[in-house]
Amino acid sequence: MDKIAPLDVATALTTVTDHWTPRVVGQVNDQYVKVAKLLGELVWHAHEDEDELFLVVSGNLRIQLEGDREVRLGPGQLFVVPKGVRHNPIADEEVELVLIETVTTAHTGDVQHERSVSIEDQLLPGA
């Protein structure tokens, strides 16, 4: 990844071929910038020590939150899930998004799941 060139988010999203498989496209200090495509439901989980930012590029995303709450996001909208809050992202249609997470953030937090992707597997070649 060229650290001096601008990043085209739409182009970066073309590198994502599987749903729920984030790809690291940049880094700001100790935060990774990731792109992902979502479809369906992930899993209830929490990140005990890290906040997680979701910025929807296309589609509509629901994020279920503990306490029977839900946040709905459309294109151009973002939401930060505070550290320690159990949440479950749901995409009833394909959603393209940008995630900003601390470099230590585990994909499915405190839950190991068949869709869990290691940080190493989220790094694009040359990143």
Image (cartoon, rainbow, N blue to C red):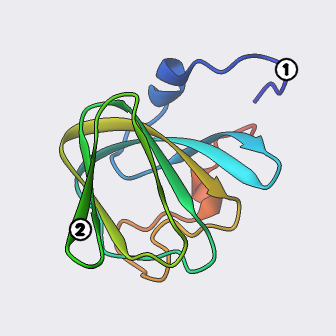
On screen, residue 62 above or below 17: below
Residue at image position (20%, 74%) is 68
Reading the image, the residue beneath label 2 is 69
Under circle 1, the secondary element is loop
Q: Amino acid at mark 1?
A: Ile
Q: The C terminus appears in which quarter of the rendering?
A: top right
Residue at image position (57%, 43%) is 34
On screen, residue 117 above or below 3: below
Cα gap from disc 1 to disc 2, whole angstroms: 41 Å
Judge depth for marks 1 and 2 and give the one in front: 2
On screen, residue 55 above or below 7: below
Looking at the image, residue 57 sits to the left or right of residue 28; the answer is: left
Q: Nearer the viewer, residue 94 or 102?
A: 102
Q: Amino acid at mark 2?
A: Arg
Give coordinates of residue 66: x percent, y percent. Answer: 30, 77
- First in sequence: mark 1 or mark 2? 1
Looking at the image, residue 4 sits to the left or right of residue 53; the answer is: right
